[in-house]
Image (spheres, grey):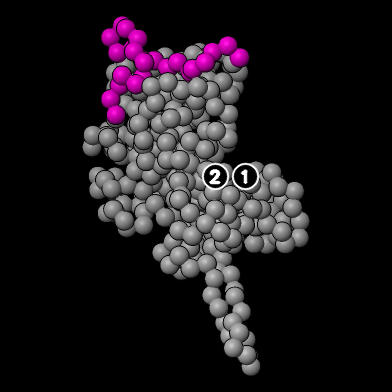
Amino acid sequence: MIQKVRLKNFKRIEDETFNLTDFDLLVGANNSEKSTLLQALAIWQYCIEQFRRAKRSGSNGVQIVLPNFTALPLPEFLLLWKDKTERRYTKIDGTKKQKPEYILVEIEIFWRTEDNIDRSLSVQLRYQSPQSVYAIPATGWADFRALEKSVDFPRIVYVPPFSGLEPSEIWYDDANVRKNVGKAQPGSVLRNLLFRVIDKSGAPVKDNSDWKEIVDKINEWFGVKLNPPQYEKGESIDIELSYRPNGKDYDIISGGSGFHQILTLMAFLYGYPGITTILFDEPDAHLHVNLQRKILNYFKQQKKIQFLIATHAEEFRV
């Protein structure tokens, strides 16, 4: 479980540490920086994925270009820096010249292993241009390689605010799923994530406990039966997903926005095997207050996953 997060020079934060528990709510008005912490954690996870693929040593970082940046939608990288300032200048003694010094964005995560050992890993970002930055583990590549092999190493999933469903959905590989989520379009990969729930184990649908849990909760909350996603790799074009309210099947796009929202939350919860921390940004959108409380209580029962939830709903405090 992530115990705390330290942010430096990130957006409106100069240097601040946030202590976390296994279930945290960030409740506040618009533009009160609720999403800042979630976005920082999403960027940390994105950088970790880039580090895993990189063959680096020494002090060389990984270049990240904006078109491939799937952590969150961003028009230019300078918006990640506090006061949009990515370097400072100091005078060189005895001269009129000034020496530039890079201001680094730092995102450090602290966690505790099952053996009660405290660990941490800081990701540093150095600005290069509006379209590119360099990222590097602050304590070096060797330390990163050792830490990320641990079974306790954090694995974070960020779920941006609900964006609405697409009328059809082709099959996406993991990279394209991340890309669409990073573009703040979680609804565009709903069918893909639910298909992964039944595809990841290879077991028959009737023996898939995760899928059964989703079906049972959808029936409890909405009184409808959710049918298994239909897709045959190499043959199908779109992933088909339907539900049955009164003895007749309808594509899920026929459902209401609250139904879509709950499906999306459940898809992220069960469609990402092995996650340790899930970040929900405004999961209360489109939900009646009673359903808000039900889904909140449901999240609290998931003891193996840490939740960090940003919301406008005061009812989530109850």
Q: Badge 1 is on which residue?
A: 49
Q: CA distance from mark 1 to mark 2?
A: 16 Å
Residue 224 — which label? none
Q: Quadrant of residue 213?
A: top left
Please tell me whether residue 22 is drawn above or below residue 189 in the rendered image. Answer: below
Main SS, magenta residues: loop
Label 1 vs 2, first from the N-terminus: 1
Q: Decide which of 116, 73 is in the foreground and name it.
A: 73
Magenta range is 234-257
Q: Amino acid at mark 2?
A: Pro
Q: Is residue 300 visible?
A: no
Whether residue 251 is in magenta: the answer is yes
Residue at image location 54% in from the left, 63% down from the top:
105
Label 1 crowd (10 A; few <14 / some 14-19 / many >=20): few
- Residue 142: image x %, image y %? 74, 56
Q: Amino acid at mark 1?
A: Glu
